[in-house]
Amino acid sequence: MQEELNVMQERKVWHLVDLPPNIDPIGCRWVFALKRNEMGEVVRYKARLVGQVFSDSDFAACRDDRVSMGRQIIFIGQAPIMWRTFKKKCISLSTIEAEFIALTEAAKEMTWFDRILGECRDRKIIEEIQEKSTLC
């Protein structure tokens, strides 16, 4: 692992900077899975970043117009990176319908965020790391 980090530093993949005062670094978690063949030998190391969306709904929570409210929070690893509270655009007739709408909104947010992350990742670097880890 250290060898791969050294190669990235030599190729100037990133520039290390000092952390500003009163700022905490955001942690994240990579989940590693081992792909094995029929003999039980490790064929490939597979890594992915874990993202989670939590959603909550209040049926007719706003007393003025009886519109349901929704809340969402997105985590990458253990760090919250996006959260919002919103009034729903449609009126739900039951708590189950309000929860279904909140679930749909959460799925849309996570799909959008997954696409943004996909655009930000440099896939060549990830593939290179996977190839080198397979050789080890």
Image (cartoon, helix red, strand yellow):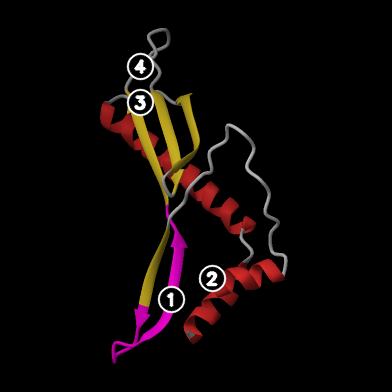
Report x, y in % for residue 31: 40, 62
Q: Nearer the viewer, mark 4 or mark 3?
A: 4
Q: Nearer the viewer, mark 4 or mark 2?
A: 2
Mark 4: few/some/many CA within 10 Å (<14, 14-19, 20+) = some
Amino acid type at image mark 1: Tyr
Magenta segment, principal secondary structure?
Answer: strand
Residue 50, quarter of picture: bottom left
Q: CA distance from mark 3 to mark 2?
A: 54 Å
Q: Which residues are magenta?
A: 35-50
For disc 3, the marked residue is 92
For disc 1, the marked residue is 45
Q: CA distance from mark 4 to mark 2?
A: 52 Å
Can residue 124 be seen? no
| Circle nearer the N terminus (3, 2) | 2
Q: Nearer the viewer, mark 1 or mark 2?
A: 2
Q: CA distance from mark 4 to mark 1?
A: 47 Å
Residue 16, quarter of picture: bottom right
Q: Is residue 130 magenta?
A: no
- Residue plotted at (58% across, 31% down): 22
Disc ID at residue 2: 2
For disc 4, the marked residue is 61
